[in-house]
Amino acid sequence: MKLFRSLLVVATVLVIGIISCKKGDTGPAGPVGPAGPDSVVYSAWIPLNFTYNVTDSLYEDTLLAPTITQGILDSGVILTYIQFPDQNNVSHIQPVSALNYIISEDYSIGKINIISTKDLTNLEYRYVTIPGSRKANSTSVKVKGYTPTELKAMSYEQVQQVLANKN
């Protein structure tokens, strides 16, 4: 009986302790920290400077691209654009992927090798690197809700709008 009373007292103390506990008030918010670096990086417009390769009858150019790292190659997205004037000297920006019948690219750490069937010297070229943030299966990899294929098919202006959206 003495053991039963001891257990009853301990149980009562525990129940009262649990019931009487309450969550404390939320304290003031701390100071805002510095903004982190933006992970999406774009190059300046780079004038192309092709040389003709007699062996394969193609025009070639190699650009330095320091933001193309092994991490970008392994899990990121690289978008590329060419800016060209029309007959009225109005500038247009076209994704390189839309010009795959004329131009082909090969990416390596710190470099973009470009080959073309036409001499595109003096046209301006830009690349954008977007690091991957999480691994998914190949059908569900998304950047701001878009697959790499969808992003590559967009105009430069559309990609700017998508990446500027803070959703």
Image: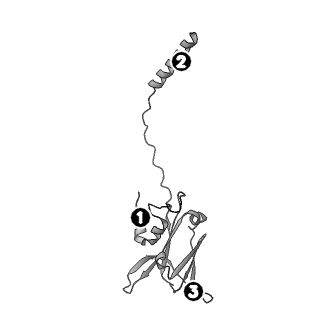
For numbered disc 1, what is the local secondary structure? helix
Name, please, the residue furthest toward the right.
Answer: 55
Q: Which quadrant of the figure contains the C terminus?
A: bottom left
Q: Amino acid at mark 1?
A: Val
Name the main secondary structure of what is drawn in magenta: loop
Q: CA distance from mark 1 to mark 2?
A: 62 Å
- Location of mark 2 (residue): 10
57 sits to left or right of 122: right
Mark 2 and mark 3 lie on one chain; the one further toward the N terminus is 2
Residue 58 bears which disc, if any?
3
Q: Quadrant of residue 87?
A: bottom left
Q: Are marks 3 and 1 in contact (CB under 8 Å)?
A: no
Q: Which residues are magenta?
A: 29-36
Mark 1 and mark 2 lie on one chain; the one further toward the N terminus is 2
For numbered disc 3, what is the local secondary structure? strand
Please provide percent x and percent y for residue 98: 46, 77
Q: Which quadrant of the figure contains the N terminus?
A: top right
- Location of mark 1 (residue): 162
Q: Residues within 10 Å of mark 2 (few under 14, many from 20)?
A: few
Q: Amino acid at mark 2?
A: Val
Name, please, the residue furthest toward the top.
Answer: 1
For numbered disc 2, what is the local secondary structure? helix
Q: Are marks 2 and 3 in contact (CB under 8 Å)?
A: no
